[in-house]
Amino acid sequence: MKSAGALMKIGVEISRIIVGAVFVFSGFVKMVDPLGFTYKSQDYLIEWGLQLFFPLALPVALALSMAEFLLGVFILLGIYRRWATLLVFVLMLFMTPFTLWIAIENPVKDCGCFGDALIISNWETFYKNIVLVVLSALLCFKWKELSPLFPDGFQWAPAVFSVAFALLFSLNGVFRMQVFDFRPYKIGASISEQMRVDPANADVYRNTFIYEKDGKKQEFTEDNYPWNDSTWTFVDMKTELLKEGEKPKIEDFQIIRLSRDSVSGQYVEDEDIMQDILSDSGYTFLMTSYSLGEADKSVAKSLNRVADFAQEQGIAFYCLTSSVFDDISKWAGETAAEYTFCNADERVLKTINRSNPGLMLLKNGIVIDKWDRFSIPGDKKLGKRLSRQGESPKPNNTSRLLLIMAIFILPLGVLNRLGRKRTKNNNLDIKNI
């Protein structure tokens, strides 16, 4: 009996570590980039024809990512064990069949359960949830076996601290440049290289040609179709995907320069300058704004100063936007913008920089630096930045992660010590009565 109880205890603790760690990681990477989670949620709303609920996408994304992180933390710390394990179990009971439907119907290719940090297939997500629903069931029914790391009367303190940490960290991800950038346009990344795939690893297709002769149709392959026989008449061609290969990380990056029509004065599409920008051995500033109608106009002067600085240094400056032409004209008139506007895909612009507007510096197709709308650099900082001769700063993600862990864990350690000291003093007071 004792051995069975010991095994059960071990099983519960292992389940606690696995479930808690997965929930903390999943919630944390979404909190790093709440807007990315918002855009993924909007993909589902589009598939379901529920665009009416777009305004709720961000607050719901914030709430879900924070809840996921906090539930994982509560389970690992053993605080509010009964409610934490119950909520996790209920959540997995809902998510498991939901991810099965996603895997079967495939409405969105990537479910986004781990944000951009770890992309797994919809079927892998479902299999992961099968394991989690079993482990969370064990935790739910054996919650008393979880060893609490904080005294019962002091659990509110780590809970309040964890909520405050999650809220502030999430809001930082909304308004400032993300602490960790897992996207293909991160600093130091080569856009050109990520637009290519080794032909040996690309999709494999089979083309079937249909020709007609004497009223009869016949199918041919690429090896034997009668391209030089005039007695056959081409009818149609069918393309079949035989093997799905790798996809380029960047597929929709296109920059169409806009120009003013000499008669109407309206903006019209001119030419694709993407290759010119990516092959430019000099610097190029790219201001990004998926919607100039919604962009923060308070930073327009700062962006104009960057554009003036670029002109003085002989550096190209373009504004990439997916806005309608009327919004572009309105922005240019209200902000006295004299830089060149270009058309680009909305999702691409949101992926490059979550900020609206934002700024990116390129050289040879490599992302040298990026800024959100709150950190647009002045002339002095730009001068120092350009003096590095195209060397892009390499963010030390390990150091950043360790720092964030320290900011979160060390106060919990202090609270744990205070809680145990308080409990010890209360016990002494009771004995002295």
Image (tube, rainbow, N blue to C red):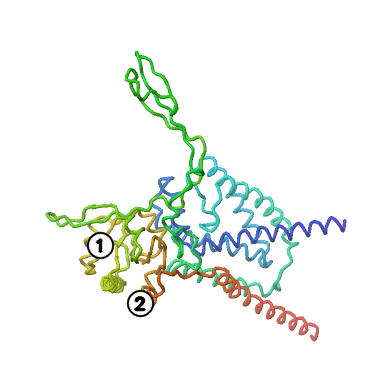
- Front-most of 40 and 242? 242
Q: Secondary structure at mark 2?
A: helix
Q: In the image, residue 362 lies at what x, y percent?
A: 38, 64
Q: Which image quadrant: the C terminus?
A: bottom right
Please indicate, yes or no, whether residue 363 appears anywhere in the rendered image.
yes
Percent coordinates x, y for residue 426 in the rendering: 74, 82
Please tell me how crowded label 2 is: few (under 14), some (14-19), or many (20+) other residues with Cα within 10 Å. few
Q: Quadrant of residue 414?
A: bottom right
Where in the figure is residue 322, as x and y percent of width and height?
Answer: 31, 56
Q: Residues within 10 Å of mark 1 (few under 14, many from 20)?
A: some
- Looking at the image, which residue sits at the far right? 1
First-in-chain label (1 vs 2):
1
As drawn, 266 above or below 355: above
Q: CA distance from mark 1 to mark 2?
A: 22 Å
User: Mark 1 highlights which residue?
Assistant: 340
Question: Residue 83's spot in the image, x, y percent?
Answer: 64, 61
User: Which quadrant of the structure image shows residue 329?
Assistant: bottom left
Q: Is residue 409 above or below residue 347?
A: below
**Residue 98 appears in the picture as rendered:** no
Q: Residue at x 54, y 72 (%)?
A: 164
* Circle 1: residue type: Thr
Q: Secondary structure at mark 1?
A: strand
In this figure, which residue is indicated by the disc labeled 2? 383
Marks 1 & 2, CB-CB < 8 Å contact: no
Q: Nearer the viewer, residue 83 or 40?
A: 40
Q: Is residue 9 left or right of residue 182?
A: right
Looking at this view, name the residue that lies furthest to the top: 214
